[in-house]
Image (tube, grey):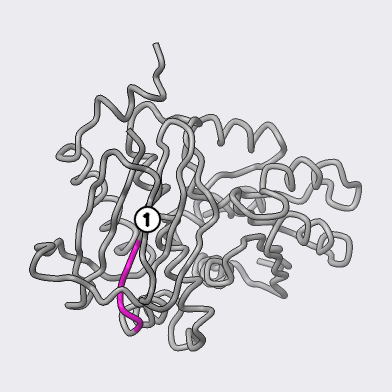
Amino acid sequence: MNTDASLVTRSHEENWLPILELAVEEVFEIMVGCRVKVAGQSEHKPNEEFTAMVGLAGALCGILTVCCDAQTAGEVAKSMLGDTADSQEQVADALGEICNMIAGNFKNKLAGTDGRCMLSVPTVISGGEYSFHSLAEGTSVETVLLFEGAPIAVRLQLES
Amino acid sequence: MDKITALVVDDSSVMRKIVERSLRQAGIELEKVVEASNGAEGLVALQGNKVDLILCDINMPVMDGLEFVRQAAAMESAKGIPIVMITTEGSESHVVQALTAGARGYIRKPFTPDQVKEHVLPVLGKKQ
């Protein structure tokens, strides 16, 4: 039996969404010191000025992205570091690390990935003038959460 | 508690600062914090500094944390320095690999200052 493939095919978006949301909530509560609330996707779309990405390979294969506007990214970094977070580089670093921890926390909550799912180091894009095309055409899970009233989108796209 | 020098190896400068803050919140007095952004830089830092504690991520470019631990464990100058991993990798196999390579503690991200205290004080031979 190919367990790598079956992990994805037997899982469904409706089962993964609460796990992803829990993973996001825990990361923000513990590392940012702020509770985030799940928002309706259609009502709250962030202006995607910062996009952090972490790749997954192995039992889960795809990409996790965290998107928000520049002001929100700055506020996240300040909440993590205090007022010392003043450069764009630090803001990008903070958002990348948030994305990394969400990806890790999410996969650690899934049964059956033990040691068979690897994460890439994070990449962060600043600026919104780009198109995102993922080759991982399969399961897609997306949630929008409010951080101090501002939307942050978290998307997980996996190969089927 | 005597002041110590800690080496923090993580590719995120934000995470290095959070780890330093967590050590201070755990009541550990720091003489100095040496930072490295990957395992290779960590090995160089070990040659040029007298270090009492190492905190190390796993997923890093250039040289990952597991390879760093293996190579640090083989260095005469690094013998006996406790290494605690701080990483998003939470699987049992990663924990086993890290401990087998020579790490003495393992903290999963996201982490609280209390977890840092719980895992770091024992390897420094201090009571919580």
Name, please, the residue furthest toward the top: A1
Q: Quadrant of the N terminus of chain B?
A: bottom right
Q: Chain of mark 1?
A: A
Establish if A10 lies above or below B30: above
Instruction: Give the quadrant of residue A5.
Output: top left
Residue at left 32%, top 67%? Answer: A67
Q: Which residue is mark 1?
A: A133
Magenta-colored stretch includes residue A69: yes
Nearer to us in this view, A23 or A52: A52
Nearer to us in this view, A105 or A44: A44
User: What is the x, y in percent for residue B49?
Assistant: 84, 67
| Tag count | 1
Q: Is residue B2 left or right of residue A114?
A: right
User: What is the x, y in percent for residue A124?
Assistant: 47, 67
The disc labelled 1 sits on which kind of residue?
Answer: His
Residue at left 43%, top 83%? Answer: A82
Q: Main secondary structure of the magenta part?
A: strand
Nearer to us in this view, B110 or A71: A71
Nearer to us in this view, A6 or B47: A6
- Report the magenta residues as a range: A66-70
User: What is the x, y in percent for residue B116?
Assistant: 51, 57
Q: Is residue B91 left or right of residue B29?
A: left
- Look at the numbered disc 1 and give the secondary structure of its residue: loop
